[in-house]
Image (cartoon, helix red, strand yellow):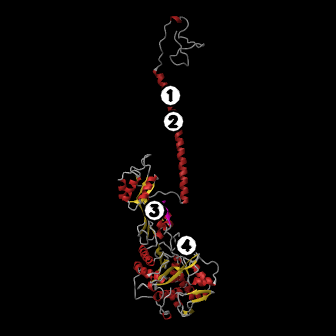
């Protein structure tokens, strides 16, 4: 009998009985006498067939998983593409968004340059080393290899201006921080040779002012955080930091040559008169461009120390003064335009003192029983100007001062601008008469400089600006006086310098015209006769005015250099007289003794004399 395989069992497995007992193959009759069967080996073809089935199943599962993963990845990429496309459309419509920097932009300094009108660098960025103390450079061990005193002494040998005690205390404190900013590469090498790992040399971009303190009140400075402060560094901060803009330097109206000459002569005048301070402005009468603006004492924007910080205040744009008699030509021009002054020969009562508008007015001295307008300006008579103001009336004088911007902060880009002390409401007769000769109204020197530009340029006021005006560019302005009135005022200002209080400013060949002003310092305690502020406001050349030059001296002293006088004629006017010949040729104005403004119609009306 042949053996029978149990269906469904693996090859070579014996069949089982219904009860679960193993039934030997061939069980039944004669089973005990049968020999044990040998092991069964399936055919090779059957094994290969089973392996193929398993491989096929594995490949099918892997293929399904791969298709699923690919589907997920495709959907992910599709979602990202949709989002990116939407963002591109949004940025395209809005015109905003990040922009890749070009190679040129990437190589530009972190802050743009500031240059003068001729391209001379006034402020620029450059890479530099700093000296940093890192007390943790050696881990948890001592901060220094040598003692703080030894290291400090070595540093003082490299930097003799450093304080030994301060450095020793600083190193002993264990506090990290700067020991010194802006050190030279050779200094860094010498410090490295000390063998102190705690002394590190980070590279930084520093703001550098190649001209030192020159123009400091215009430029301002950059603080440790990289933000512009005070001057045009603050005004132009966004532009100077913008990679798209800082490739081209920011050009100012300043002329460094004129600025240097003005500062030099102001410093000399301040020293000669022992004044607390001084300031000056050079202004283009047709465009309002400020070619020079100085306030002394100044500061060095390369190093803002305690002394420098005290001098950041700008006397020319931020300090308001009663500037005195420099207002008198403004009053006369307004009266000429209004018709209340129509005859230069008309005589006004004068003397040493006189009551005008129920107010007692004094002159510097008695210039005679009566004066005409040219004489009143030559001698700087308060008494006559008070009468001119009374006749003119408060409404008209107030309107002119408002048109000149005297009732609000001066117009210029600088952030530091002083608010005038303006008499509010309709002006009374007393207010009108005192403002007429320069008291009762406090403004900045820049207010007066802009007013004088209008006085001589044909009667049009232009806002002062530190931005260079392009040739042919139309600048904003408003008419204050008629062209005929301006022509008359040029004559009168020239006469004041030729034979009046401004004689010392008469630079040969430059046809200077101007007016002195001396005012007592006023505060809450009243007026102080022993303290004065002096001003000389001038323009040149008067036959065709191009520039206003204004100088103010803060509390000058009477001494031998000033012939023991404190008035503007002896301290402010001489500075203008020295500045004009220095800057004239630089600005294309050469001295010419053969030319002058025609004053033949008023010359017979004047007699030489001196006032304030």
Gap in angstroms between the C-alphas marked 1 and 2: 14 Å
Mark closer to the chain start, 1 or 3: 1
Which of the 4 image quadrants contains residue 541? bottom left
Stretch in magenta? 223-229
Circles 4 and 3: CB distance less than 8 Å?
no
Mark closer to the chain start, 4 or 3: 3
Q: Secondary structure at mark 2?
A: helix
Say which residue label 2 marks: 63
Whether residue 226 is in magenta: the answer is yes
Mark closer to the chain start, 4 or 2: 2
Left or right of 258? Residue 25 is: right
Q: Nearer the viewer, mark 4 or mark 2?
A: 4
Position in image of residue 65 (x %, y %):
53, 36
Q: Is residue 1 above or below residue 372?
A: above
- Viewer-nearest residue: 308 or 587: 308
Say which residue label 3 marks: 111
Position in image of residue 314 (x %, y %):
50, 71
Say which residue label 1 marks: 54
Q: Secondary structure at mark 1?
A: helix
Q: Nearer the viewer, mark 3 or mark 2?
A: 3
The residue most toward the bottom is: 604
Say which residue label 4 marks: 418
Q: Secondary structure at mark 3?
A: loop
Which of the 4 image quadrants contains residue 118? bottom left
Gap in angstroms between the C-alphas marked 4 and 2: 81 Å
Q: Crowdedness of circle 2 by 10 Å Cα count: few (<14), some, many (20+)?
A: few
């Amino acid at each position: 009998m042949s053996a029978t395989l149990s269906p469904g069992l693996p090859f070579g497995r014996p069949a089982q009985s219904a009860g679960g007992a193993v039934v030997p193959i061939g069980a039944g009759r004669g089973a005990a006498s049968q020999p044990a069967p040998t092991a069964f080996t399936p055919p090779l073809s059957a094994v290969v067939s089973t392996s193929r089935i398993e491989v096929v199943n594995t490949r099918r599962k892997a293929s399904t998983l791969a298709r699923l993963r690919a589907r997920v990845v495709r959907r992910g990429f599709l979602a990202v593409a949709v989002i990116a496309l939407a963002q591109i459309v949004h940025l395209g419509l809005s015109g905003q968004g990040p922009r890749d920097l070009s190679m040129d932009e990437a190589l530009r300094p972190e802050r743009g340059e500031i240059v003068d009108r001729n391209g001379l660098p006034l402020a620029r960025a450059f890479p530099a080393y700093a000296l940093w103390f890192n007390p943790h450079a050696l881990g948890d061990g001592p901060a220094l290899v040598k003692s703080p005193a030894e290291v400090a002494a070595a540093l003082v040998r490299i930097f003799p201006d450093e304080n030994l005690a301060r450095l020793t205390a600083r190193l002993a404190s264990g506090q990290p921080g700067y020991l010194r900013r802006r050190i030279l590469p050779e200094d860094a090498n010498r410090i490295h040779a000390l063998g102190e790992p705690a002394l590190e040399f980070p590279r930084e971009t520093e703001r550098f002012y190649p001209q030192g303190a020159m123009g400091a009140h215009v430029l301002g400075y950059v603080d440790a955080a990289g933000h512009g402060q005070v001057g045009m560094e603050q005004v132009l901060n966004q532009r100077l930091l913008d990679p798209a803009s800082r490739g081209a330097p920011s050009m100012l109206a300043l002329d460094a040559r004129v600025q240097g000459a003005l500062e030099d002569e102001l410093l000399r005048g301040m020293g000669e008169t022992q004044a607390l301070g001084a300031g000056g402005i050079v202004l283009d009468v047709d465009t309002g461009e400020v070619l020079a603006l100085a306030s002394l004492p100044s500061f060095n924007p390369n190093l803002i120390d305690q002394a420098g910080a005290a001098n950041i205040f700008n006397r020319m744009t931020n300090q308001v003064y009663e500037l005195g008699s420099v207002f008198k030509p403004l009053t006369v021009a307004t009266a000429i335009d209004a018709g209340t002054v129509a005859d230069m020969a008309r005589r006004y009562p004068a003397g040493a003192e006189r009551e005008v508008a129920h107010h007692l007015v004094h002159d510097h001295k008695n210039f005679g029983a009566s004066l005409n307008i040219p004489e009143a300006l030559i001698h700087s008579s308060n008494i006559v100007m008070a009468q001119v103001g009374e006749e003119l009336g408060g409404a008209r004088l107030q309107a002119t001062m408002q048109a000149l911007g005297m009732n609000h902060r001066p117009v210029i880009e600088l952030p530091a601008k002083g608010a005038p002390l303006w008499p509010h409401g309709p002006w009374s007769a007393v207010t009108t008469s005192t403002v007429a000769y320069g008291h009762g109204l406090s403004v900045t020197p820049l207010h007066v400089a802009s007013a004088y530009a209008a006085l001589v340029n044909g009667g049009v006021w232009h806002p002062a600006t530190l931005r260079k005006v392009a040739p042919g560019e139309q600048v904003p302005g408003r008419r204050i006086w008629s062209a005929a009135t301006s022509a008359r005022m040029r004559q009168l200002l020239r006469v004041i310098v030729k034979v009046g209080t401004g004689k010392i400013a008469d630079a040969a060949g430059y046809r200077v015209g101007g007016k002195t002003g001396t005012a007592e310092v006023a505060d809450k305690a009243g007026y102080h006769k022993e303290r004065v502020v002096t001003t000389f406001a001038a323009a040149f050349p008067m036959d065709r005015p191009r520039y206003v030059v204004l100088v103010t001296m803060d509390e000058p002293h009477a001494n031998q250099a000033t012939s023991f006088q404190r008035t503007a004629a002896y301290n402010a006017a001489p500075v203008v007289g020295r500045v004009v010949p220095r800057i004239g040729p630089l600005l294309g104005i050469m001295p010419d003794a053969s030319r002058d403004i025609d004053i033949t119609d008023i010359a017979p009306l004047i007699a030489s004399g001196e006032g304030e």
